[in-house]
Amino acid sequence: MQPALGWVEIVLGAALLGSGLWKLVHPSPPRLAEPAWLNRIATLGPVSCAGVGLVLNIRPKALVLGTAAGLALSARALPFAELVICVLVYTVIGVSSVAVPVIMTLASPQTMVKPLEALKKRIVNPSQTVTVVVALMLGALILGDGMTRI
């Protein structure tokens, strides 16, 4: 079963590398202003925000990363208790990037306005560069992991 998992990881890693290289060679034009959808999100309620969060996790990059994590866990043949711990750690790490700012904002809204605005600018301006770097790094990692299985 390891060689089959290896080939799947190779395909997923190559897809991420290809995506990163495509963005590197064919960059989008620079943004002169923040995307309109980003400003509209600020006016959404809790249910709408939950829907946006679900839709954002259906993106190909998120699906590839989740599939790669699942393949890596399934290849280890861990006992059930260890597998549950690994899934919980993966989930906590994935959720923390959203949960921590939300909890801090609920605890002290006025204190979080400036840090969140600064973070928004730091993410929006170089977002294409961040996407390329993440896709290339994770693609190489997943591809390499797959190559060790075949």
Image (cartoon, helix red, strand yellow):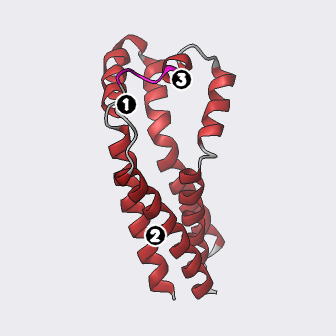
Residue 33 covered by magenta stretch: yes
Q: Which is nearer the eye, 43 or 88?
A: 43
Amino acid bearing label 2:
Ile
Amino acid bearing label 1:
Val
Element type where label 3 sits in the image = helix
Residue denoted by label 3 = 37
**Disc 1 to disc 2, how far (Cα)?**
27 Å
Whole-percent x, y for residue 22 in the image = 42, 56
**Disc 2 to disc 3, how far (Cα)?**
32 Å
* View extreme (top): residue: 110
Q: Earlier in the sequence, mark 3 or mark 1?
A: 3
Residue denoted by label 2 = 142
Residue 140 covered by magenta stretch: no
In the rendered image, the vertical position of residue 122 relative to residue 116, given as above or below = below
Residue for point 50% across, 85% down: 149
Whole-percent x, y for residue 65 in the image = 53, 58
Residue for point 64% across, 21% down: 46
Amino acid bearing label 3:
Trp
Nearer the observer, disc 2 or disc 3?
3
Q: Earlier in the sequence, mark 1 or mark 2?
A: 1
Residue denoted by label 1 = 124
**Disc 3 to disc 1, how far (Cα)?**
12 Å
